[in-house]
Amino acid sequence: MECLSIVQFLENKSILVAGATGFLAKVLIEKIMRVQPKVKKLYLLLRAEDSVSALHRFNTEVIGKDLFGVVKEKYGANLNSLILEKITVLNGDITRDDLGLQESILEELFQEVDIIVNSAATTDFDERYDVALGINTYGPANILNFSMKCRNLRLLLHVSTAYVCGEKEGLVLETPFNMGATLNGTRGLDIENEKKIVDELLKKLRAESAPEKYIASTMKELGIQRANKYGWPNTYAFTKAMGEMLLGHLREETPLVIIRPTIITSTFQEPFPGWLDRCQVNFIHFDDMNTENMIRAAKENYGIIEYEMFNFDPKTIFWDDYFMYTHIAAVVKYGFRR
C-alpha cells in the first residue's frame, strides 16, 4: 500500500491512543501530527490525579520531548493552535470500566472515535502480579468493552509483545492464543482463577497487617511462580499473553489487530535518527561489519553457528522506522475493510 493512501486514510479520523506517554505512543502521535495535520482528533489517554495533572504530563512527557522538534519547526507559531484544535488529553485508567473517564466526555468518544490504539502496559518483567494483571491482562479487556460502545469504530489496534511466545528457538509463528493455552502444555490456566488467587492472597496479607513492602515482594514472587508454572519466563510475558487471550475470546465482531513487536530501539530515520526516550543514541545498522561481529560473538560465547542464528539475512531488512510503518499500515489495511 502506498504511503499516500495511508495519509489519506488518516484524514478526518478520530483516534484514541491509550498509554499516550509511552515510547511507542509518542512516536505514533508525532508521526500523525507531522504527516497528517488534517486528522480530525487525537484523544490521548493517560493516568494522572486530575485533568490538570494529565495536561501537565502531556506537556512535559509528550509534546515537550525532543522527538517533536521537527513538528515544532514545521508548524512554528501555529503549533499551539493545532494542538488545541486536534488534541484532547484525557485523564483515564484502562484498569477501570469505561477507562475511568468522566460521563461528560464518554458520549463524545462513543460517537467520534474511529480507531483505538492500545499501547498502555507495564513492561517490568517482574512487576507485581496484581498490578500486571490489572494493566496487561484486564486492561485490554476494558479497552475492548469500551471499543464495543464506539458506534463508528473502524479498528482496535492492540500492541502486545513478541515475548508472549516465550523462549522458543527457531521460527516462531505468530499464532493467536486460545483461552487457557499454555507454553508448556500444563492444563488448568483460568484467568478468572488467577485473579481470584491474587485477590485472596492480598486479602489474607492485609488481614494480617503485613507491611506494604512485604506485600509488594510477595506479589512479585507470585507472578513469577504463576508464569513459570505455565511455561512463561516472567510476569510481563505471561500477563500480556493472557491479555491477548481475553481479546480473542471476547472480541465478537470487533475489528481487531494485535501487533507483537520485539525489542524496541531508537528511531532510525524519522523524525530524525537516534531518538530514544530520555536520551539519544547511535543507531546500530546491520551492515557487513556489525553482522560479522554478531555472528562471531554468537559462535564464541554460545557455540551458535550462522545458519542456526539467522533465518534471514539481517542486511536485507529495511529498518526505516519499521515498527511505526507497521503500526499505521495495519490500521489502514484493516480500516479499509470496514
Image (tube, rainbow, N blue to C red):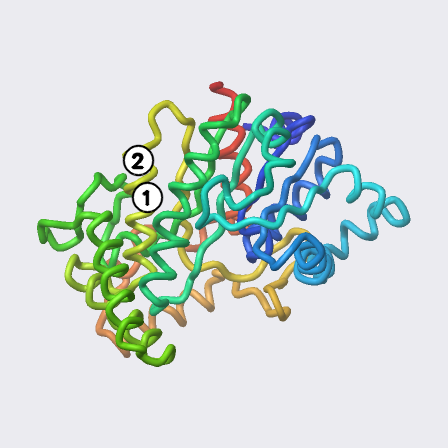
Mark 1 neighbour class, 10 Å CA radius: few under 14, some 14 to 19, many 20 or more: many
Placement of the N terminus among the 4 image quadrants: top right
Is residue 2 left or right of 155 when viewed as pictured? Answer: right
Is residue 49 left or right of 132 when viewed as pictured? Answer: right
Residue nearest the observer in this picture, 115 or 71: 115
How many marks are shown on the rendered structure? 2
Q: Is residue 90 above or below residue 21?
A: above
Badge 1 is on which residue?
244
x, y percent for residue 299:
27, 73
**Residue 69 placement: quadrant:** bottom right
Badge 2 is on which residue?
248
Name the residue located 17 percent from the left edge and 59 percent from the top edge: 231
Q: Is residue 283 above or below residue 88?
A: below
Name the residue located 55 percent from the left edge and 32 percent from the top edge: 115
x, y percent for residue 223:
27, 65
Q: Secondary structure at mark 1?
A: helix
Residue nearest the observer in this picture, 136 or 266: 136
x, y percent for residue 219:
30, 69
Name the residue located 62 percent from the left edge and 63 percent from the top edge: 274
Residue nearest the observer in this picture, 34 or 120: 120
Name the residue located 64 percent from the left edge and 30 percent from the top edge: 108
Indicate the amino acid at tag 2. Answer: Gly
